[in-house]
Image: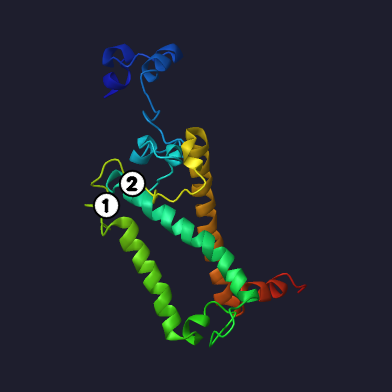
């Protein structure tokens, strides 16, 4: 035992490692991500980042949904929800201030209005929505058939009466603006409707309560 304890480091090949040698050994380690996400550089880029769709180049997809779902189908859904919420954020305020004459059961509260308005009015709303979905999608709603036509652009329903799309640069700018405004509107409408749930009052009627002095 004493012989082992007294043995020199050279006998066991335990020569001290110099700092220069340590650096040389560690220099071969590579911690960088080969293709990082532009929005979240500590994650690998999702499939949407290279999809070529306007606004998708930021690569924000932390759940990697675009890796196993059709990115065009998801963009179609995102644009539709954004457009609906852009109209809804205006409508939720407008119906609080104005009402059509002769509408039975008018209620400025958008939550309780669903139960006070006449059933035929709700049927008309749902009917128009159903017609629009069937007409513009040509009866194709699923990821397996919605984009069988490879030339189809997500969200393009052919409505451009002022011909903004004829200018390619202007079209890309407006498409990105629509996408960003739609995302903002989805957040705004979610906040508005939850404000109504919490306060029990229409949006504008509850603003005074929210900012009132304690």
Count the labels in the image. Answer: 2
Please state the horizontal and vertical placement of residue 101, each as a whole percent of the image.
Answer: 59, 82
Asked if residue 39 can be seen in this view, the reply is no
Q: Secondary structure at mark 1?
A: loop
In the image, residue 124 sits, relative to residue 79, either above or below, namely below
Q: Nearer the viewer, residue 149 or 111?
A: 149
The Cα atoms of the two marked residues, 2 and 1, are separated by 9 Å
In the rendered structure, the answer to whether residue 114 lies left or right of residue 138 reads right
Residue at screen point 54% across, 87% down:
105
Q: From this viewpoint, is residue 204 visible?
A: yes
Q: Which quarter shows the N terminus? A: top left
Q: Residue at x 37, y 73 (%)?
A: 127
213 or 132, nearer to the observer: 132
x and y, in percent, of residue 16 in the image: 39, 15
Q: Classify 52 as above or below 106.
A: above
Residue underneath mark 1? 146
Task: Report which quarter residue 21 is drawn in.
Answer: top left
Q: Which numbered disc covers residue 68?
A: none
Foreground mark, 2 or 1, reads 1
| Residue 141 point in image, percent of width and height | 28, 58
Q: Position of residue 202 (x, y in %)?
A: 61, 76
> In the image, is residue 169 above or below residue 20?
below
Left-right relation of 106 to 49? right
Are the two marked residues, 2 and 1, in contact with CB atoms closer than 8 angstroms? yes
Instruction: Say which element carries label 2.
Output: helix
**Label of residue 72 in the image:** 2
Give left or right: position of 69 versus 117.
left
Q: Classify 10 Å Cα crowding around label 1: few (below 14), some (14-19), many (20 and above).
A: some
Quadrant position of residue 96: bottom right
**Quadrant of the image for the C terminus?**
bottom right
């Amino acid at each position: 035992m004493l012989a082992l304890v007294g043995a020199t480091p050279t006998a066991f090949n335990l020569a001290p490692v110099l700092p220069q040698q340590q650096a040389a050994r560690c220099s071969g380690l590579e911690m960088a991500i080969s293709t990082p996400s532009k929005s979240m550089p500590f994650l690998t880029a999702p499939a949407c980042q290279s999809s070529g769709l306007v606004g998708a180049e930021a690569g924000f997809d932390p759940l990697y949904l675009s890796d196993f779902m059709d990115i065009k189908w998801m963009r179609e859904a995102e644009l539709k929800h954004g457009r609906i919420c852009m109209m809804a954020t205006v409508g939720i305020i407008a119906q609080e201030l104005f009402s059509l004459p002769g509408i039975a059961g008018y209620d400025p509260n958008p939550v309780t209005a669903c139960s006070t308005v006449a059933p035929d009015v709700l049927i008309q709303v749902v009917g128009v929505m159903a017609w629009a979905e069937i007409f513009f999608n040509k009866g194709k709603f699923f990821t397996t058939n919605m984009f069988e036509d490879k030339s189809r652009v997500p969200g393009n329903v052919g409505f451009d009466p002022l011909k903004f799309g004829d200018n390619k640069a202007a079209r890309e700018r407006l498409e990105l603006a629509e996408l960003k405004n739609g995302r903002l509107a989805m957040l705004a409408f979610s906040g508005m409707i939850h404000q109504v749930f919490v306060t029990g009052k229409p949006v504008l009627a509850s603003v005074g309560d929210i900012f009132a002095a304690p």
